[in-house]
Amino acid sequence: MNPNIPSIDQLKEIALPAPVSYAPQTWGWWVLLGLLVVAVLLVSARRYWQWRRDRYRREALVRLAQLQKRSDDLNALRELPELLKRVAISMPPTHHTPPVGASLLAMRQAHSTSMLTDKTLSSERRPETGSLLQGDVGALGGGDWQAFLERHSKQPIPADFSQQLAQLAYAPDATLQALPADQRQQLFDTCKLWVEHHHVAA
């Protein structure tokens, strides 16, 4: 046996380098990671807040879909104006002030004047007046209601939309029964468009 031939016992295991850590090696990367985590948390919290805020919108869309399935029912048509008013009242309070149009402003001025000059108001009438002033959006009608709908709509709506809603609410049954099917469909589509895309505070 040739003694110069190396033996397998003489083989030594090669030392491997230390594993590379995936953790950031400098404080700057830790800061960047922390900022990224904070940003993700903030975005998630904002999305959740928006989802909670838009609960009234989702519920209104569900109810609107139910009404649209009964478009031939007069009660379904008459509920559309009420549904839009409930949606408008449920919007964030910042959108309720200042009032849209001059009629509410005049109402406020008239109320203030009467409170200063008329000392004979009964106690029963005072709470009624106060409740009206607290529900500015619910008291909107005519041109003021149309202006409110247009101001908060991201897409154009018919110029006589508020008049169509008033017709649904107050017209005789015979008038609603005479509405063509395509006009009823257009009313439902416009209501859905406004409920789904109306602008609220970010």
Image (spheres, rainbow, N blue to C red):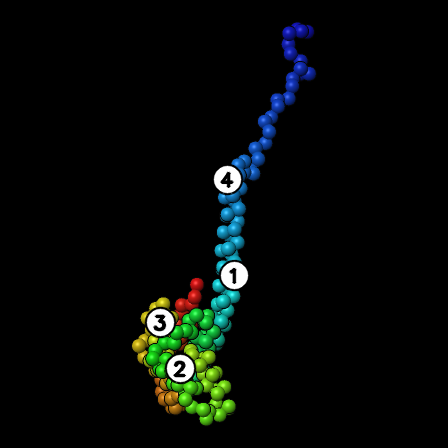
Residue 151: assigned label: 3
**Residue at point 60% right, 29% down?**
18
Left or right relative to 172: residue 30: right
Secondary structure under tag 2 reads: helix
Pick whichever of labels 1 and 4 is earlier in the sequence.
4
Residue 142 shows up from this direction: yes
191 on left or right of 62: left
- The residue to which callout 4 is attached is 28
**Sooner in the amino-acid sequence: mark 1 or mark 3:** 1
SS category of the residue bearing label 1: helix
Of badges 2 and 3, nearer the viewer stands 2
Say which element carries label 3: helix
The one of 147 and 20 positioned closer to us in this rendering? 147
Name the spot of residue 5 as percent of width and height, x first. Answer: 64, 9
Residue 24: name its quadrant: top right
At a point 50% along the width and 69% down the height, the residue shown is 55
Q: What residue type is labelled 4?
A: Gly
Element type where label 4 sits in the image: helix
